[in-house]
Amino acid sequence: MAKAQATAPAPAEEKDALAEMNRLLFEAPIAELAESQGISIDEAVALRVEKSIEAAPLPVEVSVRPIVPQGNLKGFASVKIGAVEIDDFKVMDGKNGMFLSPPSKEAPGTRRGYRSTTRVLDRGLQERLDALTRDAYAQAVEKLVARVEALRPTPIKEQLAEAAKGAEQHNASHKAPAREKEGHDDR
């Protein structure tokens, strides 16, 4: 066992080797990458592209359609990860706040009668989706409230008060007509 530990590279050496490989892959000239790996320039270019694609973060977007709450269900969402869009996530409000529940379909042979059709396996991605969901839900509700406020008619009392105020201003801006002596009929 002591022999196995002596031959294993030290963590600092592994860290340095990883840092050097990252430098070659992402920063060094292609010729240096090809020479260090013993590959052709074309293979070095393909390797750099492949590793760059693996390292690039995928854009994630969530759009929410709020509904009249039905228990914990607050709406439905679409999740776009890169060029893939998945519809029918359920926006749920649980004891720890709002979260996304995966889409599901009927499955008579299961205990609950439904089975998930999508799963989020990465905990970090699930937390990111939940945070994006909270923001998207708040924005969607804000838009709905603004739309309702814009469409809601002004109450009659407020309309009458505004009209009276406008009439007072209009009347105040005009002079009262001069009174003339009333002429008598000389009949």
Image (cartoon, rainbow, N blue to C red):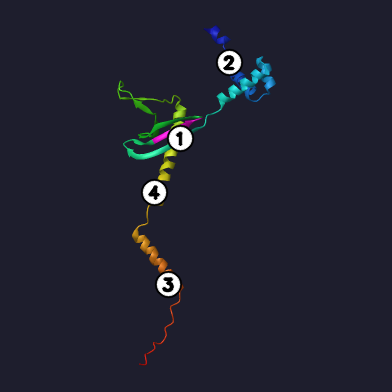
Q: Earlier in the sequence, mark 2 or mark 4?
A: 2
Q: Secondary structure at mark 4?
A: helix
Q: In the rendered structure, does residue 80 fall within the stretch colored magenta?
A: yes
Residue matched to label 2: 10
Mark 2 vs mark 3: give the one in front.
3
Question: Which numbered circle lies on residue 72?
Answer: none
Q: Position of residue 105 (x, y in %)?
A: 35, 26
Q: Quadrant of the C terminus?
A: bottom left
Q: Residue at x 59, y 22 (%)?
A: 50
Q: Where residue 13 sits in the image (x, y, percent)?
A: 60, 17
Circle 1 crowding by C-alpha within 10 Å: few under 14, some 14–19, many from 20: many
Could you tell me which secondary element the residue under label 1 belongs to? strand
How many angstroms separate mark 1 from mark 2 (CA)? 43 Å
N-term-proximal mark, 1 vs 2: 2
Other-residue count near label 3 (Cα within 10 Å), few / some / many at <14 / 14–19 / ≥20: few
Q: Which range is magenta?
A: 76-82
Res 51 → quadrant: top right
From the top left corner, tell me how far across and down residue 69 is, in percent: 33, 39
Q: Is residue 78 magenta?
A: yes
Local SS, label 3: helix
Question: If you read the primary sequence from the N terminus, does the residue marked by circle 4 or circle 1 appear first?
Answer: 1
Residue at which label 1 appears:
62
Which is closer to the viewer, label 3 or label 1?
A: 3
Mark 2, other Cα within 10 Å: few <14 / some 14–19 / many ≥20 = few
Q: Nearer the N terminus, badge 2 or badge 3?
A: 2
Q: Amino acid at mark 4?
A: Val
Q: Which residue in the protein does label 4 denote? A: 148
Relative to 77, 34 lies left or right = right
